[in-house]
Amino acid sequence: MSKSASRARLFEIIRRRSFGRGEVTLASGRKSDFYFNLKPTMLDPEGATLLAELTYEALKDDQLDFIGGLEMGAVPLAGALAQISWIKGHPIAAFFVRKKPKEHGAKLAIEGLAKGETLEGKRVVIVEDVTTTGGSAMKAVESVRESGANVVLVLTMVDREEGATDTFGHAGLPFRSLYKASEFLKA
């Protein structure tokens, strides 16, 4: 399937499985009359595959060491991308950032790294399923920067176009998205 055909097919899956109308309160606290819940797309076999392939295509030239982001939205994305990157012969390891470090065991904030492995000096992309203001992704950015990582990009599957571009711009971070909310609102 061509990249444009894959993108069109994924758009339809997101529209059918993950986009809705109706009043909701977003993670940012804002009210909205539409929403995206990408979990049904990210956990669908075809949706997960297309998200991973399109994300890989968007990132393959960025010379990344790791991909990850804040739990829960980044977990399925990072895992699927790690798998497809291995299959394509250009492995990108995955991790995720806990919203709150575990209070037992190793008490880690960043999960997925092997014993002795760190993000220090590594080129990292932060991924997110849906971005509104960018606040959630910035929590992940701050956490991985504290661990010494070089955050080179924030990538979201759907940009709600409600302030994230400004948030990341002020932080000096490049920001890209696979889709914009306006594409779904027009459809």
Image: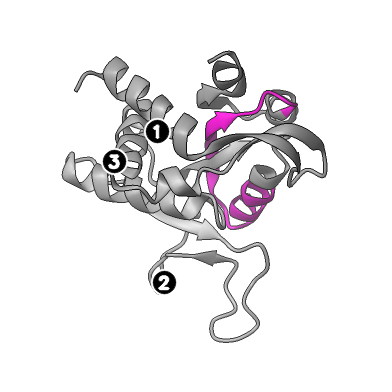
Q: Residue at x 55, y 57 (%)?
A: 72
Of the residues shown, which amino acid type is indicated by label 1?
Answer: Ile
Magenta span includes 138: no
Q: Is residue 149 above or below residue 181?
A: below
Among numbered discs 1 and 3, the one appearing first in the sequence: 1
Say if mark 1 contacts mark 2, CB within 8 Å: no
Q: Position of residue 83 (x, y in %)?
A: 26, 50
Say if mark 1 contacts mark 3, CB within 8 Å: yes
Binning the other alpha carbons within 10 Å of mark 3 as few (below 14), some (14 to 19) or many (20 upward) gives some
Reading the image, the residue beneath label 2 is 116
Reading the image, the residue beneath label 1 is 13
Q: Position of residue 115 (x, y in %)?
A: 40, 74
Which residues fall within the magenta stretch? 139-163
Marks 1/3: CA distance? Answer: 8 Å
Among numbered discs 3 and 2, the one appearing first in the sequence: 3
Reading the image, the residue beneath label 3 is 46
- Left or right: 147, with 170 as reference point: left
